[in-house]
Amino acid sequence: MKIFKNRIIHRLMIVLGIIAILTLVVVLTYSCSPQFGGAITAKAKNKYSNSPNFKDGKFINRNEVDVAVKITFSDFIKNLPLLFEPRDSTTIPSNDLPREDMELSFVDNEKAKTQLFWFGHSSFLLQIEERNILIDPVFSQRASPFSFMGPKRFSSSLPISVDKLPKIDAVIISHDHYDHLDYKAITKIKDKVKMFYTPLGVGVHLKKWGIEEERIVELDWWQEANADELKFIATPSLHTSGRKPNTTASTLWASWVIKSETESIYFSGDGGYDVHFKEIGERFGPFDFAMMECGQYNEMWPKLHMFPEQTVQAGIDVQAKQIMPIHWGAFSISSHSWTDPVERVIDAAKKAKLPLIIPIIGEPIIIQDTIKYSEETWWKTIK
């Protein structure tokens, strides 16, 4: 009996030792790996306490709407493959998506017209008033802190190499999730960027990555910053944030209004459907163009991301003259098919008679042009 008891104790000690080692590895990984970003200090929390969107050490949604994911064990098992690289042909295309070479387009552009270039998902290059603005630039092959796991980009290459990007006047970031704030992208472009504009707290990551404080402008909802002839306004969204399990809601999330003297553009960032869209439309609409989240939705997190029908309604609410569905076409973060967002948003937009554009990655989007419903269904050509 004593021998048996000693064996049990021995095995238990081995298990506890393994757990301790794994815990140490996790702690060291979080502490030493720069891609996880910086940490909000007590001094910063004291500063953010003046914000109506900050409570009990965390940022909150309007009316304290709870966006917590309700997931059962069976849901977890069902969605576990998404943490790695799903091979289901419905969630990931079997071939690279079509794309156009961006380099010639923006080099040859006389910059008389405002134009956008889509990298897939929610990443854009905007050229307006002879200025280059990057929006949520994510250039890595995975939307993850690791190169070996996490959602993998549908296409093997970008419409332009990062080193061929022009000088960037501003980078606008909606929040700090990995599919919107990319450590590798920021470190590659930081020396050619004049200014960074973020919601409250997100600047802590940029500082961690070597960007000087004077080049970072943090805004609360409804606050604005002037950049020469342009105006950037941080507006509400219904979402959350965090790059580690213990940093949820430690930084603010936002949508963005970009205004010149003649044009208004709206970028929804991430988030569920709520009343803030109407308020944004009333304050700053109508918009010449709106990039509206439409992808990576799931019944388990209905308030974190909009469903396509809500995307169209949100476009109507913000008083957009035309919308473009974003947050699709690059990464599979949910279990719906990769074409479900675009197919459903087309049907909803036609019913609502809301002009819609669905460009190829890298294709110039000229804001001043009259854009009608896209009749080209390029995604259907993917085998």
Image (spheres, grey):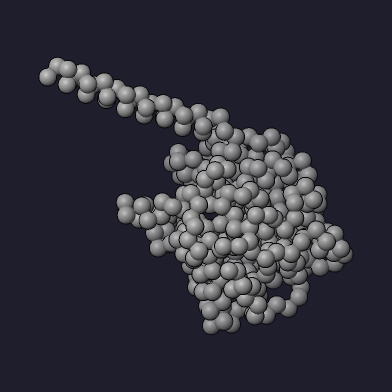
User: From the viewer's perspective, is 252 left or right of 158?
Assistant: left
User: From the viewer's perspective, is 120 left or right of 64?
Assistant: right
Tell me the quadrant of the picture where the C terminus can be found: bottom right
Q: Nearer the viewer, residue 305 or 377?
A: 377
Q: Nearer the viewer, residue 9 or 176?
A: 9
**Residue 232 percent location from the top left of the image:** 69, 56
Marker count (numbered): 0
Q: Quadrant of residue 277?
A: bottom right
- Residue depicted at x 53% and y 79%: 347
- Residue depicted at x 81% and y 68%: 113
* Residue, far top: 2
Residue 348 shows up from this direction: yes
- Residue depicted at x 49% and y 40%: 244
**Residue 2 percent location from the top left of the image:** 14, 16
Q: Quadrant of residue 75?
A: bottom left
**Residue 57 percent location from the top left of the image:** 46, 40
Q: Nearer the viewer, residue 247 or 256?
A: 247
Q: Quadrant of residue 323?
A: bottom right
